[in-house]
Image (spheres, rainbow, N blue to C red):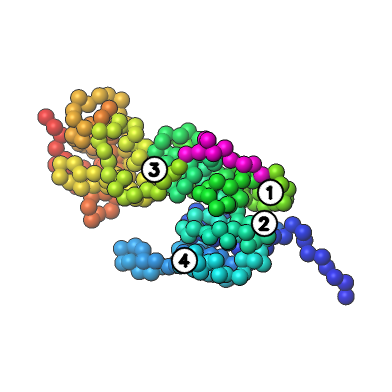
Amino acid sequence: MCNVRPDPKLLNLSFAGTPDIAAVILEALLKSPQHKVRHVYTQPDRPSGRGRKTRPGPVKQLAQQFAIPIKQPATPDELNQDTDLKGIDALIVVAYGLILPASVLSLPRHGCINVHFSLLPRWRGAAPVQRAIEAGDRETGISIMLMDSGVDTGKILLQDSCVIGNTDTALSLSERLASLGSDGLLEALNGLETRIANSKVQDDSAATYARKIGKQEAEIDWRMDAQQIERTIRAFNPAPVAFTSLDNVKIRVWEAVTLDAASGREPGEVVAYGPEGLDVATGSGALRILTLQLEGKKKQGIREIHNGYPRLFVPEK
């Protein structure tokens, strides 16, 4: 009986990730004939939704569909004790949510590879998509990176860019970047050793930091100009969602557009309210709210809101 040599391109991988964007990239790996995902690491199940029932995350659900062994360490120390990481070629990390101990980074044969949703070194950190939209960047992309002990400071294996549209939300942009990241990762894994040998060191002097978003940041500051507020609304859609209080009515703001005409009113004053929009004065210009959510209600278009509550907001005279 002759011995059959294994395909030298076949990579034995583990995957670490939790949310939808990570599941998109995991699915691309699972459907690739050149790679074998041995294990999936994901965050422990947590309560979600109105009923606060404990549910598995998107990555765990996908791994269950493909019958991939699942591990859910709650702490870095638990991950550090996992001996299975020693027998793989690489650990692929996408929005995992757990900091990898330095000792883990060198366990796989080729180390740990991260798919980061920015063109590093711009927007290192936890919220690169949101911060790019908030800052008014016209371009972003994905970086396939060899992880080191720093925060998104590792060597770059591959990058690909995409345009940020004028109406992009964090959700729509993340979905496009997840698709781009899937393709980029598969390309980077093809001939991985060569790519590692030719990897590029980041320019630390050009780095910016995408700090984690706090819920308090989502409160609209009407003293800002209309364009900045509009970008913030898109950046915080679908989470944590921009919110404000107008005429003592608490609302979450899902969609808005800027108005060219100066309002002549104080920031935060309601300029006009009708089926076309809820217009609010800002520090410079005005903002027209198109989709909002009343407290305890579902999000609705402004026409629907106005039909149901025609006197909810009172324009200043």
Q: Which residue is mark 1?
A: 196
> Mark 4 is on which residue type?
Thr
Residue in the image at 27% along x and 24% along y: 261
Where does label 4 land, which residue? 75
Q: Secondary structure at mark 3?
A: helix
Taking the image as shown, residue 282 lies to the left or right of residue 206, namely left
Distance, label 1 to label 2, CA atoms, is 8 Å
Residue bearing mark 3:
235
Residue drawn at the location 66% of the way across and 64% of the way down:
88
- Residue denoted by label 2: 110
**What element does badge 4 sit on?**
loop
Give the SS element for disc 1: helix
Pointer 3 or 4: first along the chain: 4
In the rendered image, the quadrant that contains the N terminus is: bottom right
The residue lying toward the viewer, choosing from 17 and 281, is: 17
Q: CA distance from mark 3 to mark 4?
A: 30 Å
Q: Is residue 48 above or below residue 132?
A: below
The residue under the point 82% across, 65% down is 5
Mark nearer the N terminus (2 vs 3): 2
Query: Which region is colored magenta?
Result: 199-208
Q: Could you give the CA–CA distance between mark 2 and mark 4, rounded to whole angstroms?
A: 23 Å
Q: CA distance from mark 1 to mark 3?
A: 34 Å
* Nearest to N terminus: mark 4 or mark 1: 4
User: Where in the figure is residue 216, as x and y percent of width and height?
Assistant: 29, 48
Magenta residue check for 190? no
Q: Amino acid at mark 2?
A: His
